[in-house]
Amino acid sequence: MKTIITTNFGKNLAIAMVSLLSISAFAQEEETKPKFSLSGSVDAYYRANLTAPNDEEAIAPGSSFANLPGFSLGMANVIAAYEGEKVGFVADLVFGPRGTDAVFASPMYSATGNIVNQLYVYWSVSDDVTLTFGNFNTFLGYEVISPASNFNYSTSYLFSYGPFSHTGLKADFDLGNEWSAMLAVMNPTDLTEFNPTGDYAVGAQLGYSGQFLNFVYSQGSFEIDFTGGFDVSEEFFLGINAAHFSVEDDGGSFTGVALYPQYAVSETFSLGLRGEYFMTNDFLGNATGIGSDIDGDGSVLALTLTGSATIGDLILKPEIRLDSSAEEAFIDNDLAPTKSLASVLFAAIYSF
């Protein structure tokens, strides 16, 4: 009897060990199994001027997006991604006015170029090095194209005047101890389908603990940008963006700084203020909405207060904005030139 008990025990132990090994192998297989995901957002808004007309004479700030009058469409954003153990891809498509504005330099060749926001493949060469090849959104600046990832619904002048996207090859490096770096060679800024000029841009980034110093040199122009932020407390966050852009041979420049204090009033409601000062110097022909003088010099102070209420996957954003220019860049309700513009909007953003 003793021998039988021992034999059964040995069999049971062997079966248990085989089962554990099978479960472990299955778990490892599940962990390394490639993953396909579909995500994105849909947004719409209402916008009205308080100090200027809202009819055929309607005007808007000189920054990008959210500038259409009345009930208006943002964009539908659909992102397909495939993540393998070492390689993957992202296909990011946009439809609607905001998407069209975001990819303004396309189509240059393909009939569908104006819906491609990002299209790239990547290879994780090691745990510390990742190569990305294709069209990717810019690494400069605090704000991004997708409204689902910004606190304020309207965008800053710094974002609007900087590059939106690049096409090329970049290498991201994890340097350890919260340090990171990136190097890139790309087509000239915002030429995302192919390169018609034969010139190339170079980019670089140095990061530490959520703070990033960025550089881009493209066709005789140079931009340096700092983007970062700090958790002052559990409820209070302060974001920062500052940049300087200049063109060689007296081609002009712009400089700007923006602060983004944001306070979480509750788990579902937050308030955020964007305070931005943006100025141009000898920047003729490019100072739309700023009102530069005859020498191309101009400046604008823009204050934007935004509320953000979360209802499940839906975000509602009421916003009031005041743009004050050094020149008479706007008009009032009597169509007379004026230096300021006050406006309001209400946006709804659904993310999936």
Image (cartoon, grey):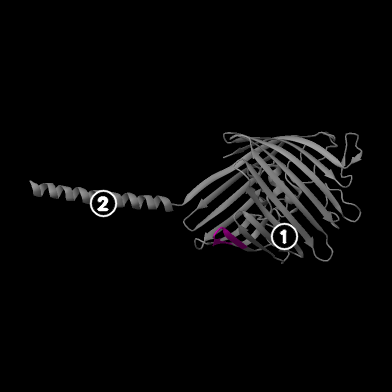
**On the image, numbered disc 1 is attached to which residue?**
224
Residue drawn at x 10%, y 47% as measured from the top left: 4
Residue drawn at x 64%, y 46% as measured from the top left: 94
Residue drawn at x 87%, y 45% as measured from the top left: 329
Instruction: Kindly identify the amino acid type of the residue bearing the numbered disc 1.
Output: Ile
Q: Is residue 184 magenta?
A: no
Taking the image as drawn, is residue 293 in sight? yes
User: Label 2: few (<14), some or many (≥20) within 10 Å?
Assistant: few
Position of residue 136 in the picture relative to residue 65 (left or right) = left
Instruction: Kindly identify the amino acid type of the residue bearing the numbered disc 2.
Output: Met
| Residue interval drawn in magenta | 172-182
Q: Please tell me whether the stretch drawn in magenta is mainly helix, strand or loop.
A: strand
Give the number of callouts. 2
Disc 1 on helix, strand or loop? strand
**On the image, numbered disc 2 is attached to which residue?**
17
Q: Position of residue 82 (x, y in %)?
A: 51, 51
Q: Is residue 27 above or below residue 219?
A: above
Q: Is residue 176 magenta?
A: yes
Q: Nearer the viewer, residue 321 or 45?
A: 321
Q: Position of residue 187 (x, y in %)?
A: 68, 62
Gap in Å between the C-alphas at discs 2 and 1? 59 Å
Disc 2 on helix, strand or loop? helix
Please report whichever mark, 2 or 1, sits nearer to the chain's N-terminal start. Answer: 2
The disc at residue 215 is none
